[in-house]
Image (tube, rainbow, N blue to C red):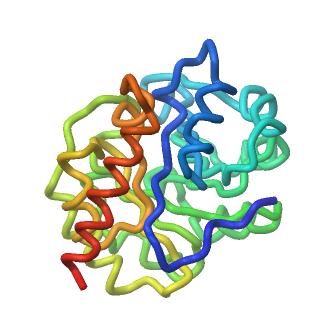
Amino acid sequence: MNTFPEAPGLRLAPSLLAADFSRLGEQVAIVEEAGAEVLHLDVMDGHFVPNISFGPPVIAALRPHTSLFFDTHLMIQEPQRYAESFVKAGCDLLTFHIEVADDPQRVVEHIRGLGASVGICINPSTPVSAIESVLGDVDLVLVMSVWPGFGGQAFMPEVLDKITELRRRVRDDQRVEIDGGIDANTVAAAVRAGADTLVAGTAIFGQNDPREAMRELRERSLEALGSNA
């Protein structure tokens, strides 16, 4: 089981959902060689969100070909039911949605007991107060800056206040991640708000040169981080 790259520092997390699925191994190798440490895996079940993406078999097939940290976003109705399958497939961190968890503490403990790190996610309309009971018990908080389930949506700047609130409240060893509409035009605002883990799909894999796209995103992120100093 990999551990999340240590704080402090910014991390780009290329989202596999935007990659060319006919050559996943090659696509992942490109971003790993370009300096990525985290690979974001968007799992959709067709229930919690209307689309279906991929599951444990695809992740298990990819796992031997990369050392990247598998940051797995479970956009599914029953995260506790399927958590073990994803951990066995090679996922390092499982993030579940507070919106589907009647007993989030139980889900956190279950995932932790499987040996994985744990994240919790909030949708654009969900307040930070919704995760109050488990905020101190997770490794990562993911704030959606689009509605989950579809790639390529426009960034929702109104969620940035939640990022700022979380940045004030989390420990140094907890991560604040943002996902949705992150590109060269929006990444600086996310960093200035306090995000340290930046999920980008089409802004990386959807470009002609993913390496150059990552370089530009990293450069703009660091510039924004410097402006906060």
Place residue 85 in its image quadrant. Answer: top right
Which residue is located at x 64 percent, y 66 percent? 4
Horizontal side of residue 147 vs 27, given as left or right = left
Residue at (72, 70) in percent of width and height: 109
Please say if 198 is above or below 39.
below
Quarter of the rendering containing residue 151: top left
Q: Residue furthest left?
A: 158
| Nearer to me, 17 or 132 | 17
Depth check: 29 or 196 in front?
Answer: 29
Q: Which quarter shows the N terminus?
A: bottom right
Image quarter (top left, top right, bottom left or bottom right) of the C terminus: bottom left
Tell me what residue is drawn at x 20 percent, y 37 percent: 154
Q: Is residue 113 left or right of residue 147?
A: right
Direction from residue 37 to residue 89 in the image, left or right = right
Image position, residue 127 (x, y; %): 28, 66
- In this rendering, the count of numbered labels is 0
> As rendered, which of 34 and 81 lies closer to the eye?
34
Considering depth in this image, is 185 or 226 the residue closer to the camera? 226
Q: Above or below — where is 62 with respect to 167?
A: above
